[in-house]
Amino acid sequence: MHNGYPASPPPSVKQEDEDQVPLPWYNPRGWSRRTKVVTGIGIIVVIIAVIVGAVEGTRARRYPDYIPLNYKLVDTYSGTSFFDQFDYFSSEDPTNGFVHYVDRQTAQNLNLTYASDSSVVLKVDTSEKNASTGRRSVRIESKHNYDTGLFIFDILHTPYGCGTWPALWLTDGYNWPKNGEIDILEANNRGTEGNAVTLHSTPGCNMKVRRKQTGFAEFLTCDNSTNSNAGCGVQGAPDTYGEELNDNHGGVYALELRLAGIRAWFFPRNSIPDDITNSSATPDPSTWGTALADFPNTNCDIPSHFNNQSIIANIDLCGQLGAQPQLYTELYNCPGKCEDFVANHPQNFTQAYWEFKSFKVYQAF
């Protein structure tokens, strides 16, 4: 019976029309099996990348907690007894310098080391006119060794001049490089580039990490077997060494060696913190601001790489660093061959001397 309304299509025809309507691209019901597999793999890769990125990002942001330590003074090197606390190294130079390190008696006879109540001096010999086998100089090593500590070096004059390679450093010279090396001050020749604070270690210590420092980071791998034993250095400004430092009446270098890391500060003479100048105060590095050089323990186990450290001060001549052509000739425009210059021009070493006011060593208890 016809009632005036159009007849509905058969159910089978209606379903067929719906099946022919294309699904949107984002609906996985319309994807082929290959598309589903590829998409699934892509999702897994993205998830892994996010997780790895988060882990690496967290690792990159890691930084040790340099909480303040309660330091107490344990050793003072100053005055007329200064050299009594050191041994004079007089063996052949292990870094192939054009130098003869002399013993204490010879150094005193030649006036290469002397001390007063106010300062001590270490210098290169200027009396020999033709030092054909190497010029006489001094290298002293503290009798006490340290695994940790806060070291305060009050410096009045740093050595400089063509052919020189001076350093103030910490190391275990008889177990090198096993126990590491910390170069607090090191320069060469004219020294106008400023000071480089550098670590040298066995494998497993690098500084490709977050750091807080004002100096410019050079190599990031501290391993002595890489980069021709350049170590991982931090370069300071020109006024941190040499003639410019000396003209400013010197200053103080502070080095902190602890489980959390190794840090070094430089303070010009007119801006030394009160807790260093005041003998009754306790030095607190947390109040000193950003360090010149920062070597955190993030990717370097400090105690296993740096221990049993002696304090060493020396003035090498030429050698593996000072005689390098790119430094001696190209950077500093020094004359002739380094060894010839050192042998025949004693008058050019009048500024090749260290003058220290004092060294102080603090340890946390």
Image (spheres, rainbow, N blue to C red):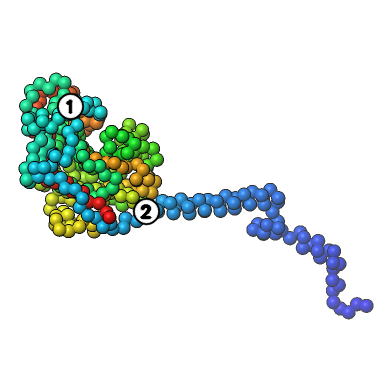
What percent of the width, then of the height, locates residue 14? 81, 65
Tell me: 272 left or right of 14: left
Tell me: 222 left or right of 29: left
Total numbered labels placed on residues in the image: 2
Q: Residue at x 15, y 58 (%)?
A: 280
Tell me: 38 left or right of 97: right
Q: Nearer the viewer, residue 184 or 307?
A: 307
Task: Identify residue type, mark 1.
Answer: Val
What percent of the width, then of the height, locates residue 69? 28, 57
Q: Residue at x 69, y 54 (%)?
A: 31
Q: Quadrant of the N terminus?
A: bottom right
**Residue 101 against residue 235 in the figure, above or below:** above
Which image quarter: residue 191?
top left
Tell me: 108 left or right of 196: left
Q: Residue at x 15, y 29 (%)?
A: 102
Q: Secondary structure at mark 1?
A: strand
**Residue 40 against residue 88 in the figure, above or below:** below
**Residue 37 against residue 339 in the figure, above or below:** below
Of circles 1 and 2, the one toward us is 1
Q: CA distance from mark 1 to mark 2?
A: 42 Å
Q: Secondary structure at mark 2?
A: loop
Residue 99: give its label: 1
Badge 2 crowding class, 10 Å Cα cut-off, few under 14, some 14 to 19, many 20 or more, is some
Badge 1 crowding class, 10 Å Cα cut-off, few under 14, some 14 to 19, many 20 or more, is many
Q: Nearer the viewer, residue 320 or 140?
A: 140
Q: Residue at x 32, y 42 (%)?
A: 306
Quick check: marks 1 and 2 in contact, CB under 8 Å? no
The mark nearer the N terminus, 1 or 2, is 2
Residue behind mark 2: 63
